[in-house]
Image: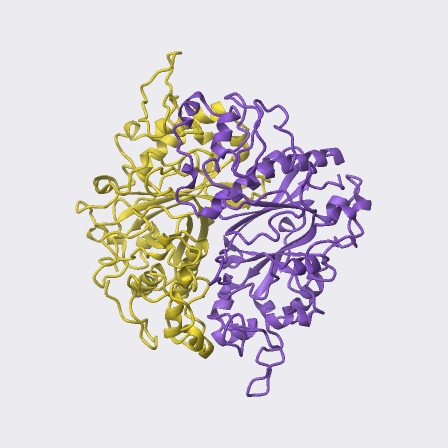
Chain colours: A purple, B yellow
Amino acid sequence: MKRNRAEPGAAPPVDPPRSGALSRRQLLARSGLASAALLATAGAVPAGADASGTSPGDLIPISFSGPHQAGIATPEQDRMVFAAYDVTAGDVSGLAALLAAWTDAAARMTAGQALTGPGGPFAPPADTGEALDLPPSRLTITVGFGPTLFDDRFGLRPSRPEALVDLPSFAVDDLGPARTGGDLCVQACADDAQVAFHAVRNLTRLALGSATVRYVQLGFGRTASPGAGQQTPRNLLGFRDGTDNLVAGDEGAMQRFVWVDRDSDQPWMVGGTYLVARRIRVHLEAWDRSTLGDQQETIGRVKASGAPLGGSRESDPVDLQALGPDGLPLIPDGAHIRQAAPSTNDGEAILRRGYSFADGVDPASGELDAGLFFICFQKDPRQQFIPIQQRLSDQDALSEYVVHTGSGIFACPPGTQDAQGLGHGLV
Amino acid sequence: MKRNRAEPGAAPPVDPPRSGALSRRQLLARSGLASAALLATAGAVPAGADASGTSPGDLIPISFSGPHQAGIATPEQDRMVFAAYDVTAGDVSGLAALLAAWTDAAARMTAGQALTGPGGPFAPPADTGEALDLPPSRLTITVGFGPTLFDDRFGLRPSRPEALVDLPSFAVDDLGPARTGGDLCVQACADDAQVAFHAVRNLTRLALGSATVRYVQLGFGRTASPGAGQQTPRNLLGFRDGTDNLVAGDEGAMQRFVWVDRDSDQPWMVGGTYLVARRIRVHLEAWDRSTLGDQQETIGRVKASGAPLGGSRESDPVDLQALGPDGLPLIPDGAHIRQAAPSTNDGEAILRRGYSFADGVDPASGELDAGLFFICFQKDPRQQFIPIQQRLSDQDALSEYVVHTGSGIFACPPGTQDAQGLGHGLV
């Protein structure tokens, strides 16, 4: 990606990020932020000092640029920080400036580099600093545009994609306004919580005067181990979650179900996708008091192995027609995997990429406020998330244990390439 | 540690945890919880399947038993879940039963094993399951007793240690009752957030009917890399935090500053320590707008390198007497490292073991609700945390940027050994 060599006002100029480029600390020194004391010792830092105690994968940046945004088909990282913003800029040029600044900052941070700006002791540091010694940690930053961005403030009404609908209400909804909506969203994922938080904090800081943060949600998961012996991570229900998820590496499936193609009514969205986020609180106390048999019939799988009921291995195909000795379906009518299955939903599927959350104790009930921050990506929510979720809300046995407390839908534009920033073709 | 071979009602009995013992999954199968389908496939699970994608350190359990509780002198893990509880048991025998159940569960979970209990499809699973496939991940569980435990409910008033005082108010306090106090606390630390959360969730579940959870706080940090090239982790101020902390591996310092000795008025506390927790919210937006020079003078160190002002390396000794060319102290009067230094505090020191937190957006201000969940351990808070914090509240330049929103003090009893559970000698 071609970008300016430095932000306005930055001195001296620094190199653009590239694989194997300067570390955050080296950049800090070169940007003039560092003190003479640091400069005196910078040469004493052993190359690779950032590497000690980290896994090799953490050292290789995931490129921010490409035909699609990263953080969608990217293998899931361990941690997530998700933020939604309200744009306060007065016109579209202010919005465009924000997206340009975010493009530049995201490219730097995902490369493991510090933000740069005017240096010296008399200016606030351009980078907040908590990730200075940390490797890229597979950081990805994914940006989306909410339906409200396409109202009259920025003249974008004609550019609103038809697929970016307002979500209907669902029977499981108890949405809090402070956890719902947003003109913009940022999904920052990394294997280190501090790196992901640093990204959202610094993007929020760059938005000063043009956008305010509406909510921030932290999440944790467990990366599926790469290679042979891969295990599907478990969610807070204690079940493996994602066994029959779309495989992000299956380009055919991604083209069919995830990436917006040239049939879109909005050319600027070609190569993009639609993100739906749902903060799904699980009533863990009620779930934990239900029997193993009830839990397994609610999900439709064996808790320990992940096998579909009636099967013996997690990888066994789900046979929704199979009957038990009693003549009843082995996978009950209300089982989550039956109601969510593509074959029950006209062949539709979504790419799920959610994280567990635990936000302390709900003061109203004294119970844990925890569950799943569900994120999915799809080509058209009208054909995918919405009808699937309507079915689940009404018929999924799991609905007894969950309530959706936050919601958002966002159009994620394609990736940034060839000097084009986030939202190119739109702003 | 000698313990019963199984919890009451468990069938069949299982082996006690030991290094190299059964994995959570294997235990699940043997405890009768697993389905026939699982048992049929258990033999197909490759030995070491839990290991893929995890670092070797995650596979070695940290023993729950020993002369001191783990999680104090233990090198800091990446993640923390801290919980405080109100005891609802009607008498001391109910409290003792809870501590016995926690002792057994903590020994199992820190060994990477699942909780066991009555099995089969018609009982709730004894273990909630989300850590079933995960290694021990250096999990430690540390339990403490708050001052309120020693009121009249359990007849423990004569056993209250003199050092377990009620904390005074400090100038930086804006404590929320829902984040303050508690009869009991649990500090669960691990390199995997899901393993730490699993521990607190299952201890909370075991407390059903004898204690309710008062608050839960999640935290994240960054483990200092082991061995040569160790770097001190940074906090959300962007500064390295812990450079001059007590070294937990320095047994002399631990005996002098941390472990309660035979001079204690309460023999049951010998080998224990006192934990003080403070939820320190940092006004990140204000901090981020201050200049690099201001930040460095507030802390007393160079941001990039961690060197004390006037020094060149992080490891340089802090010279509080050094003057600059202008005749003023290089480390200003109000600098945090001056006010917190042992030499400023009659030689007293504490073992700090805190984690960063980020709890979303404060609805009142629209700013990030984030900062440091400060935890320290010491032999006597009357000589250590309290006078140090009084000095910091009044004179530390950093106080301008922080507010303490939660607080707790807890007596952490010694470790469990030789069939003695948590709180032996007390209940």
Vertical comparison of A357 with A288: above or below: above
Residue positioned most to the top = B326
| Image coordinates for residue A368, horizontal then vertical, percent | 49, 58
The residue at 53%/28% (across/down) is A125
Q: Is residue A423 above or below residue A247?
A: above
The residue closer to the viewer here, B164 or B13, is B13
Q: Residue at x 32, y 33 (%)?
A: B244
Q: Is residue B64 left or right of residue A138?
A: left
Q: Residue B319: x, y in percent?
A: 31, 23
- Determine whether, in the image, residue B102 is placed left or right of residue B417: right
Q: Is residue A422 left or right of residue A240?
A: right
Q: Is residue B183 visible?
A: no
Image quarter where the C terminus of chain B lies is bottom left
Q: Position of residue A68 (x, y in %)?
A: 66, 48
Q: Residue furthest bottom?
A: A326
Is residue B166 in sight in this rendering?
Answer: yes
Q: B21 or B146, which is in the foreground?
A: B21
**Where in the figure is residue A287, as x and y percent of width and height?**
51, 68
In the rendered view of the protein, which quadrant contains the N terminus of chain B?
Answer: bottom left
At x 62%, y 35%, the residue is: A104
Quadrant assignment, res B301:
top left
Marks counted in the figure total 0
